[in-house]
Image: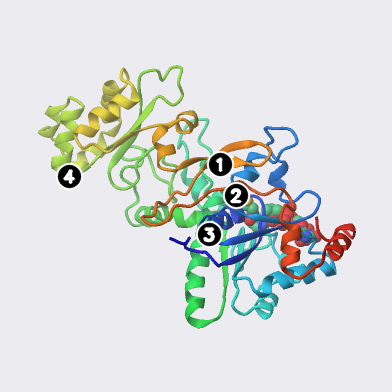
Amino acid sequence: MASPLEGIKVIDMTEVQSGPSCTQMLAWFGAEVIKIERPGGGDPTRHELLDMPGLDGLYYLQLNSNKRSMGLNVKTAQGKEILTKLLKDADVFVENLHPGAAAELGFSWDEVHKINPRIVYGSITGFDENSPYANVKCYEPIAQCAGGAASTTGWWTGEHALPTQSGAALGDSNTGMHLLIGLLAALLQRDKTGQGQWVRQSMQASVLNLCRVKLRDQQILEHTGRLTNYPQYPNDRFGDSVPRSGNIEGGGVLGWCYKCKGWETDSNAYVYIVIQNEPKSFALFCQGIGKPEWVTDPKFNTAEARDKVKEEIYAEIEKFTIDKDKKDVVATLSKYGVPCGPVLSMKEIENDASLRQNGTIVEVPQIERGSYLTVGMPMKFSDFTPQIKGAPLLGQDTDPILKSLGYSDEEIVQLRDAQVVA
Ligand SMILES: CC(C)(COP(=O)(O)OP(=O)(O)OC[C@H]1O[C@@H](n2cnc3c(N)ncnc32)[C@H](O)[C@@H]1OP(=O)(O)O)[C@@H](O)C(=O)NCCC(=O)NCCS
């Protein structure tokens, strides 16, 4: 079976994480992705957070596999000419340069659309065009702060009651995945209309899309003055916006994270348990944690009642979990149909055999280094298995790409000497 995007050509002027995560996925789907990099250093992530001297960093490798790399100085006249030639028969162009930079280089949406009306053009920015921050350069934490994640994440009281960002790349890779969806939709539409379009994805909007439920909560707070399930309910005062919510489940059911055996020395010896509202599920949960009397006790046997004494419930559940291994807790409670899961450290995830078996974590062969670990294709298809290969060295494919555009060996040497290509 051919790969879903076989025959699709992508010109990739993205750097760091947001854009490269998108174009890497296009490459995994089988598109030919040509990464255009500044001669000299290329993508800054090649040189950041290095673990092996002289080799491209893991940050770069994890975001650029299956691509081709061309060192091309697009600030030179000849560089612009080469990029224009590449765009003529490309299907997708993606950039995440700082606001205005693509236009300054002469490759705005309007210009690229003139070069090739069929091309789908993708841009990542920090903020949408009418935002007061439209011209601000943006990195991950900035997007999490402006997209509603930081104000609603973390502790609501005590010295650590600060806006807190998630460890997940909600601003970066999440934005790349959002853009990916937009590009695939635009490609499908182009097949019907013959016309490409400009897909713009801001990091703020991508984060906010994942904070949709917090906007729900904001309106509930405005309508009722309180938010059940939140740690502040029922005894503390609510302010006028959604507070930080600690470890609550957030979807109308009680959920919390509990200490398990070894918590004193292992910061991840914890388990998360959700108490479903439906009476049959609640009865099974009570059996599972050895509290069958809660089923008939009006203090505990409705969701509303439980919410008012949730601190007491959390303490009782922790008496059940604290002397047990987190995986044993899950094994026991899952027999009663209780939704629960262990907190897994990165070390545990790295060594998890099932994640490897499912291709969610893959070991990728890499030129010079040997191999590296990365997160593989998160979606699983019935009739397509991505072949994840290594990431290219800077300019590894410059010569064959130039030759495919008709440049002779002699011309390529001249372009290299003039530092147009690398
Ligand atoms: C990530 C970001 C903050 C980095 O900003 P930056 O350090 O100015 O780096 P950029 O890559 O945008 O641009 C640097 C320069 O390289 C130039 N450049 C990039 N590729 C080039 C190439 N192949 N040839 C010649 N010049 C190139 C750009 O035109 C720009 O030139 P200028 O400063 O004279 O305008 C910024 O690009 C940004 O805000 N992007 C949008 C949001 C985003 O994706 N953030 C990253 C999240 S991981």
Q: Is residue 30 above or below residue 293?
A: below
Tag on residue 30?
A: 3
Badge 4 amino acid: Glu
Which residue is identified by label 2?
Answer: 65
Mark 1 vs mark 3, CA separation in Å? 17 Å
Residue 392 spot, x, y in % from top left? 67, 49
Q: Is residue 291 above or below residue 195?
A: above
* Among the 4 quarters of the image, the one containing residue 269: top left
For residue 148, side relative to residue 413 (left or right)? left
Q: Which numbered mark, 4 or 2, is in the foreground of this view? A: 2
Q: Residues within 10 Å of mark 2 (few under 14, many from 20)?
A: many
Q: Secondary structure at mark 1?
A: strand
The tally of labels here is: 4
* Residue in the picture at 38% in, 27% down: 270
Which residue is identified by label 4?
Answer: 278
**Which one is nearer the viewer's eye here, 317 or 93?**
93
Mark 1 vs mark 2, CA separation in Å? 9 Å
Q: Which numbered mark, 3 or 4, is in the foreground of this view? A: 3
Mark 3 vs mark 4, CA separation in Å? 45 Å
